Amino acid sequence: MKLKLFFIIIIAAGLILFIGCADIADLPEESQTEEMAEIPEEPLFDVPRDYKHDNIEIFEVSCNCYFLINRETKEVVIIDPGDRFVMLRNACNDNGLIPAAILFTHGHIDHIAAGEDLRRALQAPVYSWHEEEYNFFNNAVMKNITWFTEETVLELAGFKIEVIHTPGHTIGSVCYYIKELNILFSGDTMFRQTYGRTDFETGNYNEIVESFRDKLFVLPGGTIVYPGHGEITTVSFEKQNNPMSKYINNK
Ligand SMILES: [Zn+2]
Ligand SMILES: [Zn+2]
């Protein structure tokens, strides 16, 4: 009897935790707090103490999912929905957000798993880089994707979003740069103090080196970097602390 009660308490606690996680207002706060708690262990350099950006909500799913929100129009661009369809759909609907697009940084399953369900539920256009990246999406039965075949500037939700092709982690990996907001969504290419694995299908170490050297390290140092996993960082912090910094020209 006591054992039964114990299990009921465990299930109830789990349920409360689950419901709590679905709250758009709480989630970014919590994830920020966890991330910030670890930062003082490292030299700070010019990393901002508060990464909160008025236009961005962060969801920790199977990857970092970002909502880029135009607070005036309530339009939202969803970057890498990961695996949490219901949570993200509700986050849109419950907050009256108008889906402008779903963007993928690359085709790995931890970034795209909820993509097709979300596309259908929100009726939002989907964008990704083509090349061989489409193989990953075919495996996940993703449909109606608008493929980039060259670097371009998207105008979505009132933002100018530059598509930067950064192969290396996968051949079709991209980063999304919004100059006016000083932010970069770096997918699995740039992480805080490290970089994406290059030993998966279509990965290439030399290409990720070039992507860092020629595409990412040339961005303004104060650019805040929102990666596909882990903690938020800045371009200048990575130029000091990322293993890829040894490839910067003239260093
Ligand atoms: Zn990946
Ligand atoms: Zn990933």
Image: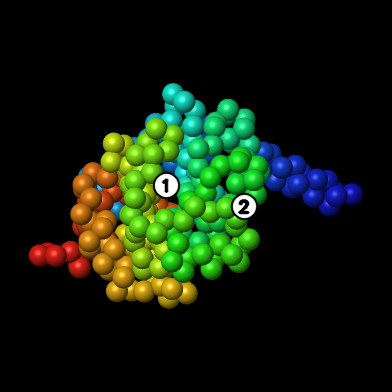
Q: Is residue 103 above or below residue 189?
A: above
Q: Say what secondary structure mark 1 lies in.
A: helix
For image coordinates 36% across by 74% down, the residue present is 204
Image side of residue 175 versus residue 58, left or right: left
> Disc number at residue 116?
2
> Disc number at residue 70?
none
> Disc number at residue 35?
1
For image coordinates 44% across by 34% down, the residue present is 157
For image coordinates 22% across by 61% down, the residue present is 214
Which residue of the protein is positioned furthest toward the right in this rendering?
1
Q: Say what secondary structure mark 2 lies in.
A: helix
- Please name which of the two marks, 2 or 1, marks the residue nearer to the observer: 2
Query: At label 2, which amino acid type do we have?
Result: Glu
Q: Is residue 247 above or below residue 4?
A: below
Percent of width and height locating residue 248: 18, 64
Question: Is residue 188 something one can see in this rendering?
Answer: no
